[in-house]
Image: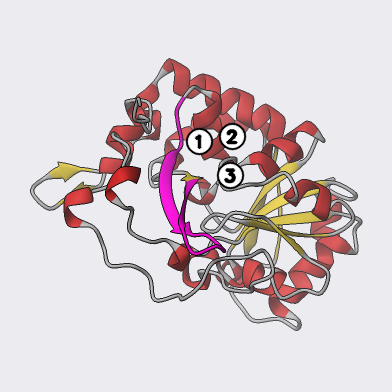
Amino acid sequence: MSAVKKLGLEGRIVCLHSSMKSFGCRFEGGASAVIRAFTDSGCTLIVPSFSYRFTVRPPENMRPAQNGYDYENMLPESGIDGAYTPETDEISAEYMGQVPLEAVKTKGRARGNHPVCSFAGVGPLAAEIIGTQSSTDVFAPLRAIADKGGYAVMMGTGLATMTALHLAEQMAGRNMFIRWAKSPDGGIIECECGGCSEGFGNFEPVVSGMERRGGAGKSVWRAFPLAEFLEEASAAIRKNPAITHCRRVFEGNKPCMLCEDAVKGGCVRRVE
């Protein structure tokens, strides 16, 4: 709780990206203790709770162009039967980590209505913030946090995990990518998602001057005022679209398809 207080986050809305490994040791309570440190300080804690295994392959009539997706070599469908609902505890824990996994199991938590890239929240304003999310407005909770003067906190993680940078891309004029999931009525729905984040470390010179830095144990915490962060990051993208591009090279010496299509402006909808 002292780390939350030292960063001036008491009573704030916080979007947390976290690495329990960053503490360098196990401690009593683990991820649940981290959540309590924020909620006992009066915070509303919001975390990404993505569930990639709900994605399915798109039918031929739902394949927009410039979508960061290889339709010719599509991956097999996920092994999850049925459709996502906000009540499920299913989460891609191998990517999200222990704190989001614990958050979706917390009594009274709220979880967004997005089958692939949901957010989950605990605390006094969680239902209000999370309730803004839909399958076609994936980053609405982050906009709501920014509008209310909230913060993004990196708990032992780098900017490559900063989901808000995808919202900055959208604010800069990019279209979000489209992915697909089963709907409760048995059909397939489109849902907006972000793209590659491996190049987001390029934003360090842009946003480092606005951070508050603290921590607990060996874990370094960086707190960013989200509204200011989004304004500066989106301006940087408009000035230099390639700032988001990662340096990964794939089979055939091809650059990242997600980054290539993002820099071009993102998904292009079919004109009927």
Q: In this orientation, which residue lies closer to the viewer: 212 or 33?
A: 33
Q: Is residue 84 above or below residue 164?
A: below
Task: Identify the image quadrant of the C terminus.
Answer: top left
Q: Residue at x 39, y 29 (%)?
A: 243
Of the residues tagged 1 and 3, which is closer to the observer?
Answer: 3
Residue 265: x, y in percent?
37, 26
Q: Residue at x 30, y 34 (%)?
A: 261
Instruction: Name the residue carrying label 2.
Output: 208
Say which amino acid is labelled 2. Ser
Span of residues in magenta: 174-191
Q: Magenta segment: does it hold 156? A: no
Q: Residue at x 78, y 40 (%)?
A: 150
Mark 1 secondary-structure assignment = helix
Say which amino acid is labelled 3. Val
Instruction: Name the residue carrying label 3.
Output: 138
Residue 56: x, y in percent?
38, 61
Q: Is residue 243 above or below residue 152?
A: above
Mark 2 surroundings within 10 Å by alpha-carbon count, few (fewer than 14), some (14 through 19), many (20 or more):
few
Instruction: Name the residue carrying label 1.
Output: 204
Q: What separation in Å lies between label 2 and label 1 (alpha carbons)?
A: 5 Å
Q: Quadrant of residue 256?
A: top left
Q: Magenta segment: does it hold 190? A: yes
